[in-house]
Image (cartoon, rainbow, N blue to C red):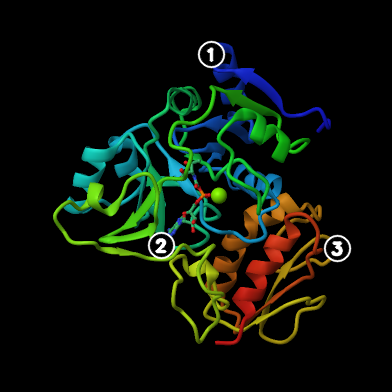
Amino acid sequence: MSPTNPRILPYGEAAIAEAAALIRSGDCVAVPTETVYGLAADATDSQAVARIYQAKGRPSFNPLIVHVPDLEAAEIIAVFDDAARRLAERFWPGPLTLVLPVRREAGISSLVTAGLETIAIRVPDHRAMQALLDASGVPLAAPSANASGGISPTRAAHVAASLAGRIPLVIDDGPTSAGIESTIVRGREILRPGPLTWADLFPGEGRGTVTMQPETGPRPSPGNKEGITAPGQLDSHYAPGKPLRLHATIRQDGEWLIGFGAVPGDDTLSIRGDLVEAAANLFDALHRADASEAVAIAVAPVPETGIGVAINDRLKRAAFPR
Ligand code: TXA
Ligand code: MG
């Protein structure tokens, strides 16, 4: 990708058509929502989702929010109870993200949910994101369109500066209206404060609890689970039911070896040694290893570069003694 990327196109038919073509080809594009600019990719395509992590340089597979056009589309992907449906009917489209049990059969990549049984989902209230959902015809995973650790983007120029050379296209539709990320709700808990407050969401129900955001909460450790809302923050999460050995170059007795590049295995993250492909395969490979007859799992070394850092972060957590 050329260092002059990304191109910035003003919102309109041509920009949406080009963005939708990129989405369908497995790439990611930046698009405004009413909260912040998001970096969107096809949520059903693991390699496309892996590209989001790679472009952001995100150091771990924190689960992503999936964007859909309406409640009907959301019900295909997540299981709604009456309370969740009432919130959705009242606040969608809008800056409300609901964490709900995921329907695996809907085909959302396990990289989006980071292997969790729940999914974060919302219906955005923005013409550009809605037009892109319509034109691409797939649910879109989209975190904020900034390099990991940077400030969330509320203008196309913020995105271009933060992700220069890493993404092909930004759709520019001016500054976003909310400017902070959506409120994330699970049951009666706010996992991330946002544009919608407790009083908006649960009027007449006291002050409620706002659980600390995983990114800003106390540093998690096995003995300190306070403030942790996304289980991905726990040292030992994503752990398979079997012991996991890292940096393995040969299979030992009773092991299922997950290979990479020159190290062949029972299964492989990427024969070509491609880190994006490896990231896309990671959770599926761990599931297959767990379901196998083997009593232990070994994983070949993965280079600590680019998205390999995220892969190794997840592998270290999976191997953490419980
Ligand atoms: O406003 C927004 O929500 C923006 C725009 C682009 O829509 N998106 C956004 O996505 O902020 P992201 O990926 O930066 O934030 C996702 C947050 C993380 O804090 C993550 O831990 C949490 O959602 N999350 C995602 N899935 C979850 C789950 N299943 N359970 C708990 N937390 C979850
Ligand atoms: Mg973010």
- Name the kind of residue labelled 3 in the image: Ala
Which of disc 3 and disc 1 is earlier in sequence? Answer: 1
Q: Amino acid at mark 1?
A: Gly
Indicate the secondary structure of the residue bearing disc 1: loop
Q: Residue furthest top?
A: 13
- Horizontally, residue 249 falls left or right of residue 205, namely right
- Could you tell me if the residues under marks 1 and 3 are in contact, i.e. CB atoms within 8 Å? no
Amino acid marked by disc 2: Glu
Q: Which residue corresponds to mark 3?
A: 262
Q: Judge whether residue 124 can be spotted in this image.
A: yes
| Residue lying at 67% horizontally and 81% vertically, measured from the top left | 255
Residue that mark 2 sits on: 117
Label 1 – label 3 distance at C-alpha? 46 Å
Q: Nearer the viewer, mark 3 or mark 2?
A: 2
61 over 32 or under it: above or below: below
Q: Residue at x 43, y 23 (%)?
A: 127
**Is the residue 172 above or below the residue 27 in the image?**
above
User: Which residue was labeled with disc 1?
Assistant: 12
Furthest-left residue in this view = 204
Asked whether mark 2 lies closer than 8 Å to ligand 1, one says no
Q: In percent of the image, x 55 and y 17: which residue is there? A: 11
Task: Identify the residue at image location x=20%, y=53%.
Answer: 202
Circle 2 crowding by C-alpha within 10 Å: few under 14, some 14–19, many from 20:
few
Q: Earlier in the sequence, mark 3 or mark 2?
A: 2
Q: Position of residue 308 (x, y in %)?
A: 75, 60
Q: Residues within 10 Å of mark 3 (few under 14, many from 20)?
A: few
Q: Earlier in the sequence, mark 2 or mark 1?
A: 1
Between disc 2 and disc 1, the foreground one is 1
- In-front residue for pair 227/271: 227
